Amino acid sequence: MTETPLPPLLLIGCGKMGGAMLAGWLERGLTEAVVVEPNPAAVAAFAGRVTVVPDPAGIPAGFRPAAVVLAIKPQEAAATLPAFARLAGPETVFLSIMAGRNVAGMRAALGGQAAVIRAMPNTPAAVRQGFTVAFPGPGVTTAQQDLADRLLSAIGEVAWVAEEGLIDPVTAVSGGGPAYVFLLAEVMEAAAVEQGLPPDLARRMARATVAGSGALLAASLEDSAQLRKNVTSPKGTTERALAVLMAPDALPALMSKAIQAATDRSRELAG
């Protein structure tokens, strides 16, 4: 069965996440898209495949996108969104991936009646292994939510929540989560060098261990705690290391504090 082609889309911002999403949509057969992006280098990879304009004034007259995807920095929202209020209408949904910006604030900037979906993807979207959680705001129709689901599933797995407030801890956990995993690889590499391993070997080993463990976690039916126990032989080397990492003031407590800090910041950005 052939999938229904994606309808016309308007992408505002084509940075790393916006570019990853656009690449995923083109792989899914997107044929009509306008991208508002002032930096030519950001859209160079899409030359000839989409229409690129530097600002809202360049959007072709009569272009009516089914979805407007807001992939700009949250700090740019107040100055940027009003220029697209003219597109707010029953046939168009706004899909935002801006951290912290809430639906009420975006609707106000877009004229008060816009159908807005707030979503938080993460950077593994670049290899179509992302995880996105989304919330449909007031006035979003089933068809519009289905379209947003199709757009987001082009870059990985999608989940929906019924409470917008849950997007803040989602931002802290899955949105920022890749950075925490990359930090793990970084500090493992540094620790390996401290123990005398050559830097090149330390880098390869740390990266492959993190990537392979993630692949095993994804493929396994066992939960993460059990997988950890499977690696931990009684009175062995891993048990000795975990005694340090799982001490009362160590990794579990630090991760809890880190997620709380990121959640708080997400809530601050809405203000």
Image (cartoon, rainbow, N blue to C red):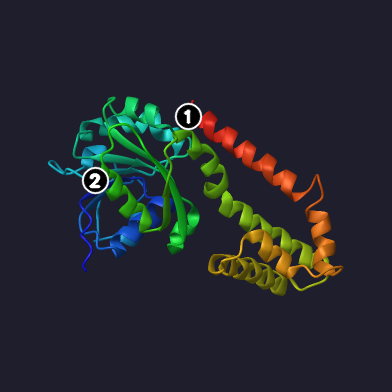
Which residue was labeled with disc 1?
Answer: 270
Residue at x 80% of width, y 44% of height: 249
- Give amino acid for label 1: Ala
Tell which residue pokes out farthest to the left in this image. 62
Q: In which quarter of the image is residue 218?
A: bottom right
The answer to whether 67 is drawn above or below residue 48 in the figure is: above
Residue 259 spot, x, y in % from top left: 63, 42
Res. 94 in view: yes
Q: How many labels does the image show?
A: 2
Q: Of residues 1 and 259, which is closer to you in this image?
A: 1
Q: Of residues 195 and 6, which is closer to you in this image?
A: 6
Residue at x 73% of width, y 65% of height: 229
In the picture provided, is 201 more to the left or to the right than 267? right
Residue 148 spot, x, y in % from top left: 31, 48
CA–CA distance between discs 1 and 2?
A: 27 Å
- SS for dot 2: helix
Tell which residue pokes out farthest to the right in this image. 235
- Give amino acid for label 2: Ala
Which residue was labeled with disc 2?
Answer: 143
Residue at x 48% of width, y 52% of height: 122
Screen quadrant of the N terminus: bottom left
Residue 233 spot, x, y in % from top left: 80, 70
In the picture provided, is 99 more to the left or to the right than 232? left
Res. 41 in view: no
